[in-house]
Image: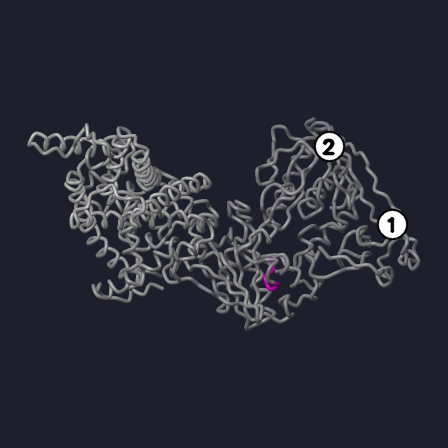
């Protein structure tokens, strides 16, 4: 797997985005002998998958799979990784692109051993967006324990700068460079794979679902962090208002998805994610009641359907066919009453629960920030692949909402497409 | 699981309500957001989710005789929150329009009232009737229609005698009542059957005394527009609707007072502008015009909401009645004899339309919604 071959076609491949799709595409191309530039805007690789507690349906930790990929990157000299990097401009045509890559300063060089001394002295704090703002980190921080590359990073907005310099004094390895500047490099590549991924849809936009108004309403991705051992609560699921172990939790499916007012498409993963979340809760709290309000439950394929069947057998998990369209907070105990019509019985359901999870969907990153390249983007922000033109390809959730398995399959296919551009040139 | 249910689908029904404004019906995917978004929908068997599926399956019998379509006040909160833009509010409006036609007799006239191409014929009927009746009476030496009234004082009765007016309008009013009576009888029986089938009632039979008592409790709700003001969207519509409703009530009261004044006390109009009844008439007339204009405005402000012929024709009638009525008075006061007699004639044409076509038009909601709300009150719909 790690042996170094030289490919027959010439040229390099750029992969934009270092999440699971980008990692796969980069490695699949590199392992058949192509030089790959892997560009990631975060200070770490792994993307959204690194925020997950467990994969469905096997319920194994994603860090395991990610580690294997990091190992493959480390062993393969053909993969050049750039973190904190963004695409500034793309010029050219299939087989011959000039890409300007903006490298944002990390303020920490490769000397860093992740000894944590700097964190101990740092006086400044920042909101930890990796945990969706549920905790804080210091201005100098390691994004998370398993972050790769294993190097600290400084948030320039939170950092007090050279005037403070406490971290510089304490660092024994001269790893901190507070005056590091951003720079732009130009790279010549033959094809580009866009694996720019997705962003959880902004749940505050559905004002009838109360997110951001009531503390005990969280999103599905927040629940992943709450359930993760490296999350803000060290893996203990608790409701935000009083840190209480929730005895009842409602899941609101299609929160902003399949909705012409928000995201008109199905985000594909939220049903399976909520079913998986039911297992998190039921494992931690054997008596907790889980209410899943849905329009239709989508568990595509035999393995997912089996998973769904298993959850259905749990007598503490209740499925109610009806979308939650209203939430009411009880100001005395911060409990939430969700309101839906049970379309099977034709009765309105007003279920009071201690915590609500909104199964929010995925919005392609390209919907939120314009990419500086000549790409065909759908109304919803997904990239449309133009295989006749070739040269640039979208993989994973940049192309369509997908789970990890399909993202990997898709990314492998796009790696082949990228190679074909080089070979057929 | 529920009992197996054989669907008796009426495809034409789906097409017809589509024309009446339910063209996006099939986008619905039954998420039931609408039933929760609706501020006036009951907790048990809420609407309009169940109406949406029944309509897309073409279950005409479950919808036409369903009181719930009348409990809806078309505020549009459901359509605003609908994730599929299926517009449940418009679907229910279309169902009501369909139901009005269904309960009306003769069907032929009902179809004409809802067909824009038939409007000239419908307006022509009173014109021909007035002139023909006036001329026939003339042949018998009764000059109730006088084309050269003359005299110093303008009095509309000199042109179009009050006898002729009442010779036409009293039968017209009785006709409308009779048509409603036939429709309402079937309507009440249907909504009761539907409520029994869907488990929406705690009453075995409709007891007339209890029903009338319920009506007494419902009327203040209607007059105060209590249901209307629970809406979030479209709340301003309540003001316009209230103006038109009170305009009509005011004018109905005025008409009755002057009817008695004329026939019992033998006092002929035109009456003094200082007469308090005249004040009421003027205020009601102005309310009708302003309310009508506000309705036009709110329809234009809401391009998402479907507005079909049934809506425009009623707003048009309201404005035509109000404007011709006010203009008749103003031209009389201005001393423009020919003009005022002409406008008066047009005004009478529209009054005829109001009486004779009301059981077939959207205005019939006055009767059907009142009865449906009364039934819901009577049957303890929760």
Q: Which residue is mark 2?
A: A90
Label 2, secondary structure: give it.
Answer: strand
Magenta span:
A215-219
Relative to A104, is A273 above or below? below
- Which chain's residue wears label 2? A
Quadrant assignment for the N terminus of chain B: bottom left
Residue depicted at 25% across the width and 66% down the height: B203
Judging depth in this view, the residue of A92 and A247 nearest the camera is A247
Judging depth in this view, the residue of B209 and B204 nearest the camera is B209
Badge 2: few (under 14), some or many (20 or more) residues near its Cα, within 10 Å? some
Residue depicted at 48% across the width and 50% down the height: B81
**x%, y% of residue A401?**
58, 46
Looking at the image, is mark 1 or mark 2 earlier in the sequence? 2
Locate residue B344 relative to residue A84 in the image: left or right. left
Relative to A170, is A88 above or below? above
Residue B20 in view (yes/no): no
Residue depicted at 36% across the width and 64% down the height: B382
Residue B359 in view (yes/no): yes
Q: Which residue is mark 1?
A: A109
**x%, y% of residue A226?**
65, 63
Quarter residue B2 falls in = bottom left
- Which chain's residue wears label 1? A
Judging depth in this view, the residue of A141 and B160 nearest the camera is B160
Judging depth in this view, the residue of A38 and A303 nearest the camera is A38
**x%, y% of residue B14?**
32, 42
Locate residue B35 relative to residue A187 in the image: left or right. left
């Amino acid at each position: 797997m790690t042996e170094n071959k030289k490919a027959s076609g010439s040229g390099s491949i750029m992969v934009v985005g270092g999440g699971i799709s980008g990692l796969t595409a980069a490695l699949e191309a590199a392992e058949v002998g192509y030089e790959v530039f892997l560009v990631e805007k975060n200070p770490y690789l792994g993307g959204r998958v690194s925020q997950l507690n467990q994969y469905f349906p096997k319920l194994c930790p994603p860090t395991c799979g990610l580690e294997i990929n990091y190992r493959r990157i480390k062993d393969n000299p053909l993969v050049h990784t750039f973190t904190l990097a963004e695409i500034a401009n793309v010029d050219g045509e299939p087989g011959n692109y000039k890409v300007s890559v903006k490298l944002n300063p990390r303020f920490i060089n490769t000397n860093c051993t992740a000894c944590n001394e700097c964190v101990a002295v740092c006086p400044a704090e920042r909101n930890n967006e990796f945990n969706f703002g549920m905790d804080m980190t210091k201005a100098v921080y390691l994004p998370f324990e398993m972050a790769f590359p294993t190097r600290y990073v400084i948030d320039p907005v939170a950092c007090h700068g050279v005037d403070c310099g406490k971290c510089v004094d304490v660092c024994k390895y001269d790893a901190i460079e507070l005056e590091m500047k951003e720079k732009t490099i130009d790279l010549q590549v033959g094809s580009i794979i866009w694996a720019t991924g997705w962003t959880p849809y902004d749940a505050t936009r559905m004002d009838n679902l109360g997110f951001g108004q009531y503390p005990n309403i969280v999103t599905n991705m927040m629940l992943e962090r709450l359930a993760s051992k490296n999350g803000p609560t060290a893996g203990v699921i608790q409701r935000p208002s009083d840190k209480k172990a929730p005895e009842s939790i409602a899941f609101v499916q299609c929160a902003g998805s399949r909705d012409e007012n928000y995201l008109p498409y199905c985000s594909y993963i939220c049903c399976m994610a909520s079913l998986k979340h039911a297992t998190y809760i039921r494992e931690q709290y054997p008596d907790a009641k889980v209410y899943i309000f849905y329009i239709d439950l989508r568990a595509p394929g035999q393995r997912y359907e089996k998973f769904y069947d298993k959850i259905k057998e749990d007598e503490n998990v209740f499925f109610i066919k009806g979308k939650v369209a209203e939430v009411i907070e009880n100001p005395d105990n911060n409990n939430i009453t969700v309101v839906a019509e049970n379309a099977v019985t034709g009765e309105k359901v007003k279920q009071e629960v201690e915590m609500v999870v909104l199964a929010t969907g995925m919005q392609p990153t390209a919907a939120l920030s314009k990419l500086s390249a000549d790409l065909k983007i759908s109304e919803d922000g997904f990239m449309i692949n133009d295989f006749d033109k070739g040269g640039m390809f979208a993989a994973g959730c940049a192309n369509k909402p997908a789970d990890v398995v399909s993202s990997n399959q898709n990314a492998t296919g796009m790696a082949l497409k990228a190679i074909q551009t080089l070979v057929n040139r | 699981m529920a009992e197996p249910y054989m669907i008796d689908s009426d495809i034409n029904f789906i097409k017809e309500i589509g024309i009446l404004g339910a063209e996006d019906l099939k986008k619905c995917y039954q998420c039931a957001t609408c039933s929760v978004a609706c501020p006036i929908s009951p907790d048990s068997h809420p609407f309009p989710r169940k109406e949406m599926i029944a309509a897309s399956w073409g279950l005409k019998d479950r919808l036409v005789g369903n009181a719930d379509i009348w409990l809806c006040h078309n505020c549009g909160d459901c359509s605003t929150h609908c994730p599929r833009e299926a517009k449940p509010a418009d679907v229910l409006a279309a169902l009501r329009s369909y139901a009005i036609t269904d309960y009306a007799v003769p069907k032929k006239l009902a179809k004409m009232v809802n067909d824009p191409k038939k409007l000239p014929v419908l307006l022509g009927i009173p014109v021909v009737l007035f002139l023909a009746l006036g001329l026939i009476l003339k042949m018998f030496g009764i000059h109730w229609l006088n084309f050269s009234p003359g005299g110093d004082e303008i009095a509309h009765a000199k042109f179009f005698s009050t006898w002729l007016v009442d010779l036409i309008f009293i039968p017209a009013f009785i006709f409308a009542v009779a048509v409603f009576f036939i429709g309402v009888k079937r309507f009440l029986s249907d909504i009761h059957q539907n409520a029994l089938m869907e488990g929406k009632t705690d009453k075995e039979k409709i007891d007339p005394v209890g029903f009338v008592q319920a009506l007494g409790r419902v009327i203040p709700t209607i007059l105060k527009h209590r249901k209307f003001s629970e809406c979030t969207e479209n709340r301003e519509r309540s003001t316009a609707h209230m103006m038109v409703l009170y305009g009509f009530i005011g004018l109905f009261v005025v008409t009755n007072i002057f009817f008695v004044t004329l026939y019992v006390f033998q006092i002929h109009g035109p009456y003094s502008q200082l007469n308090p009844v005249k004040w009421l008439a003027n205020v009601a007339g102005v309310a009708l015009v302003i309310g009508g204009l506000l309705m036009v405005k709110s329809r234009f402000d809401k391009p998402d909401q479907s507005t079909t012929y049934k809506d425009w024709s009623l707003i048009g009638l309201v404005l035509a009645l109000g404007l011709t009525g006010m203009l008749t008075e103003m031209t009389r006061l201005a001393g423009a004899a020919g003009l005022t007699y002409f406008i008066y004639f047009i005004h009478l044409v529209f009054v005829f339309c109001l009486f004779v076509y009301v059981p077939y038009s959207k205005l019939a909601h006055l009767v059907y919604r009142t009865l449906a709300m009364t039934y819901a009150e009577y049957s303890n719909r929760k």
